[in-house]
Image (cartoon, rainbow, N blue to C red):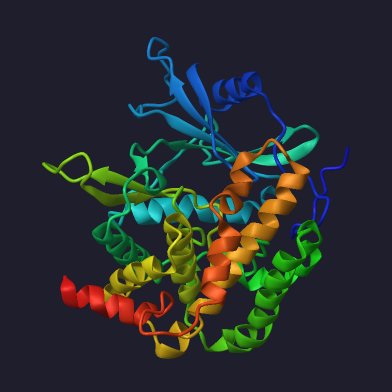
Amino acid sequence: MTDTVPSSLQPGADIRPVIDHEGVKLLAERLYGISVLELVELNGYDDKNYKITEDPNVKNPLITTHNPDGYVLKILNSMDSQDVSIVEAQNEIMNFLNARSVTCPRPVRNVYGHLHSVETLGGKKHAVRLLEYIPGEILKNVPLTEPLLYQLGEFVANLDNKLQNFNHSGLVSREHIWMLTKVPELEKFKFVIKDSDKLDLAEEVIEEFKYAVVPRLEELERGVIHGDVNEMNILVATKPGGSQSDYRISGIIDFGDIQYSYYVFELAIAMTYVILLTGNPASGGLVLAGYTVNRRLPDDEYRLLKTLISSRLVQSLVLGAYTSAQDPNNAYVTSTEKANGWEVLRKIRKTIPTDQDPTDWKTIANDYLTRS
């Protein structure tokens, strides 16, 4: 079997790692000297992630500082594993942010002193690494209060401000189908959408991206972004002394989509998943309010938000449907569709401008800041 895979996802490509729980335990022991006591598979789109609790009775001289909350063994898909410079960039960005008081996973060195290794699994090469597990609840599982969504915007702006000082050569030429710049390539995957009304809506958004966004790309501010700020990747915790329902943003995980791209894309992606989670386009205005307090958003970039948010929804719906067709057992990939993504998209696209336009995010943001 060949281990050659395309640099950008193509229809029919199978890139997920093939491994069972016993194989994961053997990897953890061979590469990190960890004797696994408990093993739980976590959500993953095209990677495999496993929460590991080590056996405390097994003394391991290879790890001098043990993480009491356990570890996550990450096995990267075969496409992204082709370029180890991307893996190195992911490790470096986590260390960079940890050093700047942003809570995120920390990579662990293996028995060879490296932060990753490339292993052959099922005939394909996959990058393998171990991260310290970060405790906390994910945003998806807590009440979405206005202050929490506002704080999410603040957090994203603060993250991007810090990342202005981060660079890595491995990200300059990175190509990934989940980048918003790849929306035009959804043409290759739209065949999976069988409903004609949904297909018309998807095609409308793809065409709008081509003529409204693509010609403007050179004018937008660029830098390294996280690239996937969603409800599964944002950690929350209760405030000290607060009630169990009084949450704050506490950290961020999953740096698999880091890229050299556009800061307005980062904001649009964060707003998209909040809107999807609430089912209400107006909730994006609360994220915008927090973001613009910490980071300036030029008017010409603000005017792209509706197209960018629509595009991210279409991207998630089309690629989710495609990946589900390839891997029917992966429930994670259809989360956008299950969250009524098509209906949310229609709400954004078909809104008639009124005094209460739910996509007038700037007015919604200003109203919230006035009330606060």
Which residue is drawn at the image coordinates 76% and 46% (left, top)? 325
| In the image: residue 167, left or right of residue 342 | left
Residue drawn at x 77%, y 39% is: 124
Would residue 94 be visible to someone looking at this image?
A: yes
Residue 97 picture location, percent across and down = 36, 56
Name the spot of residue 110 as percent of width and height, x first. 52, 33
Residue 354: image x %, image y %?
A: 41, 84
Q: Quadrant of residue 10?
A: bottom right
Q: Quadrant of the N terminus?
A: top right
Q: Which residue is farthest right? A: 1
- Residue 110, relative to residue 299: is it above or below? above
Visible residue check, residue 261: no
Please say if 81 is above or below 75: below
The location of residue 175, given as percent across then percent down, is 67, 65
Using the image, determine if residue 14 lies above or below residue 365.
Answer: above
- Residue drawn at 29 percent across, 66 percent down: 154
The one of 48 and 323 positioned closer to us in this rendering: 323
